[in-house]
Image: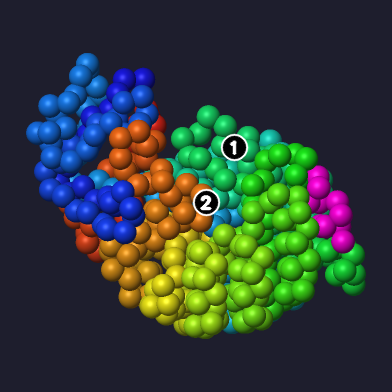
Amino acid sequence: MPDTLITNIGELVYFSPSGEKLIREKNCALYVVDGLIRSFGSQDEVLSNVSGNPKEIDARGCLVTPSFVDCHTHLVFAGKRAYEFRRRIEGESYLEIAERGGGILSTVRSTREASEEQLVEIARRRLDGMLRCGTSVVEAKSGYGLTTEDELKMLSATEKAGRDHPIEIIPTFLGAHAIPQEYKEDREGYVDLICDEMLPAVKEQGIAKYCDVFCDKGAFTVNEMERIFTRAKELGFELRAHLNEFENLDGVRVACELGAVSVDHLTKSDRDDAEAIKDADCVAVLLPGTTFFLGESEYADYRMFKGEGSRVAVASDFNPGSSMCYCLQSVAIICAVYLGMTPEEILRAMTIEPAYSLGMADEFLWREGVPARVNIYDVETLEELIYPWGVNHVRGVVVGDGYFS
């Protein structure tokens, strides 16, 4: 593939080498050589260093930023739950539907029935859609198998879906997503299965980097999370956690003490949680699209977390039950309207902060030699990215030496 030169950038927005400052420059260009950023900034200066015959992309005076990082998704699953959405519109709650056999366990049944090849095909279509919306890195959880065989199948499908795809996938094992029907009367037995069989098998498979637990009302207890995480750490997994979506069980403190790199949802969190996250150098991952999709009125308190000095990321929580949306631009307008986040704060929360939670923040601090992950939009300024809403403003994405539009 030829090198890539993006010219006529109306506004170039990126972060300083330390990550502390957001920089906005006018009339710029960006030059990519062998899939790595070579130079960016003033168009005249960049053009003076161009050699050969790179593929030129005319930004037409529009906005260019780092591409998005989605650090909390449930990418791989089969089946649909549109009827459950209708039931929620008609008055049932998410937890009520789950208690009646719907919810996560509905998707578990469909995913168990699907072949690995079917899951790969479904996931690749979703990845294509995510890329069109400007996402270049995706964390993807298992959790709809809930048997050792089916969890391994999901992780294998995740890895295969990402092969030769421009999006980089970071797999996470989420066997502790729900108690499966066959263990309904034996919670301890299922936790035993996770610790004694699933986690060692997942480790041997070698695909998942992280272990996640859904610790909340109607899911796993803090003690169960602690046991699973302790075993996961022994096996070398890094930790992520679903916490405080429905009820504050004091799990944030425990997860942070165990070394979790991210704690996610946090709708019911308080200042003690925010302080624990900061002290542990953990990342608070907010999922406002989920709150919106569930029709709830209480959103995670972005200002509280920032006021306590916590790192804050925003992710889609793409999943079939509570957030059937993988476009982070759609989540961005929710951040602005309901969380009071500025365009600069939203971009940070969808790029370097989620990248930090995945151990790859340096790759989103632009300098010579970092991998190219660049969004080109059809709007001229960062403010416009969240102003005309309900529209995909990404015109094209540069990932490595490829351009996708």
Q: Quadrant of residue 348?
A: bottom left
In front here: 324 or 353?
353
Colouring rule applied to residues: rainbow
Q: Is residue 110 visible?
A: no
Which residue is at a point 81% across and 47% down the rendered structure image?
Answer: 200
| Label 2 secondary element | loop
| Label 1 secondary element | helix
Q: Is residue 270 left or right of residue 345?
A: right
Q: Earlier in the sequence, mark 2 or mark 1?
A: 1
Q: Is residue 369 visible?
A: yes
In the rendered view, tell whether residue 294 sits above or below residue 164.
below
Indicate the amino acid at tag 2.
Answer: Leu
Which span of residues is magenta-colored?
192-201
Q: CA distance from mark 2 to mark 1?
A: 19 Å
Residue reaching furthest top? 52
Q: Quadrant of residue 33?
A: top left
Task: Measuring from the top left, give residue 266's x and y in whole percent.
Answer: 54, 74
Disc 2 or disc 1, which is closer to the eye? 2
The answer to whether the residue labelled 2 contacts the one labelled 1, judged by CB atoms less than 8 Å apart, is no
Tell me the quadrant of the picture where the N terminus can be found. Answer: top left
Residue 161 is tagged as 1
- Magenta stretch holds residue 109: no
Indicate the amino acid at tag 1.
Answer: Ala
| Disc 1 packing (10 Å; few <14; some 14–19; many ≥20) | many
Q: Is residue 315 left or right of residue 378?
A: right
**What residue is shown with label 2?**
358
